[in-house]
Image (cartoon, rainbow, N blue to C red):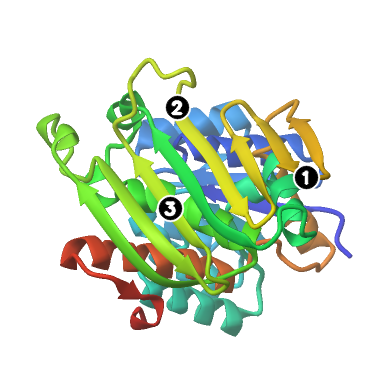
Amino acid sequence: MKNSINCSLLGCGSYGKVHARAFKSDERVNFVSLWSPTRSRREENARLFGCRSAETWEEIVNDPSVDCISIATPDFTHTEYAVAALNAGKHVLLEKPMAMTTRDCKKIIEAKDSSGKKLMINYHNRWYPAFIAGRDAISSGKIGKPVCGNFVLSDTIAWVEDNMKWADRSGPEWFLMTHTADLAFWMLGETPVEVFAMAEQGVLKRKGFPTRDLVKATIRMTGGAIIHFESSWILARNWRHPVNDMWVSVQGESGRIDIQADYENITITSDTYQTPFVLQELTEMVPIQDFISCILEDGKVAVTAEESLLATQAVEAVVMSYRENRVVRIDEIE
């Protein structure tokens, strides 16, 4: 078992900095280098985190001293970088969504299988205590068999205007709904069967962002539960949380779970059981540190590529549904 690992980073945006802080604060990590397509950004962050600024992403991928690469670049770039890194023999921690098509996800999985290296998709909500408690309540039968649910995740319009320079190449369904899709499938322990979705565009387009304002989807699960998903990029600028609104409810045959994620708490109520849970501090660096442990200890990754493919497949079906105005079966997506 190794005691330390050499890590590098592709992408220095807001979430790339979470990866950088996790690397810098972990004594098991030697933070070797980082890259951003913007010279000033990569040089500033290299100074801030005490590592080398690479001129190109290929320089990092081809560096024989690098063991692990975190990829925190825009959604549409993931496939090229992940496949190249895996083919170069690097372990890869990849931000969500794994890719924007099922076909590209399968390319990444093929590269992972061929390389024998570890790949984890950073669906970090799985590490939040409230969602873990919700999942445990469902799996232990505290609320009975799930009947229906709501998974809502939206960003303030200020976040989009200030940060989403590539919004036209993504959308709330890719940037946000893949989070809640993965979370729902993981919490319920079920997979999606069919989808009907609708989308609306206008507010952001008038502001110069040609993308969807919001997407709503209804998904029927293998166990019969009907789950509503909602993601918007036009939440009011003065919302109580500076970035987003996130809440989850799951109604079972004998109880219900409600989680207000931006209040970081959970309430579970049934005929015989109730508990509050309050999260004391944010845990977004924990999955990154867990992936380092996974590599050093040769353990299993917490979020597999195969699981993450399912979230992409579901949102790809969402896109097909709102474009074609019809119900789409998941098995149509290949």
- Amino acid type at mark 1: Asp
Q: Helix or strand or loop: what does disc 3 sit on? A: strand
Q: CA distance from mark 2 to mark 3?
A: 22 Å
Q: Is residue 79 above or below residue 250?
A: below
Question: Which quadrant, please, contains the C terminus?
Answer: bottom left
In the picture, the disc for residue 271 is 1
Q: CA distance from mark 1 to mark 2?
A: 36 Å
Within 10 Å of the Cα at label 2, are there few (<14), some (14-19), or many (20+) other Cα atoms?
some
Within 10 Å of the Cα at label 1, are there few (<14), some (14-19), or many (20+) other Cα atoms?
few
Q: Nearer the viewer, mark 2 or mark 3?
A: 3
6 or 130, which is in the foreground? Answer: 130
Q: Is 5 left, or right, of 86 in this rendering?
A: right
Dividing the picture into quadrants, the one containing residue 140 is: bottom right
Q: Helix or strand or loop: what does disc 2 sit on? A: loop
In the picture, the disc for residue 243 is 2
Q: Position of residue 235 (x, y in %)?
A: 34, 28
Q: Position of residue 251 (x, y in %)?
A: 59, 51
Q: Helix or strand or loop: what does disc 1 sit on? A: loop
Q: Position of residue 172 (x, y in %)?
A: 34, 46
In the picture, the disc for residue 35 is none
- Amino acid type at mark 2: Val
Residue 88 visible in this rendered orientation of the protein: no
Question: Which quadrant, please, contains the N terminus?
Answer: bottom right
Instruction: Report which residue position mark 3 lands on.
Output: 228
Q: Is residue 199 above or below residue 51?
A: below
- Amino acid type at mark 3: His
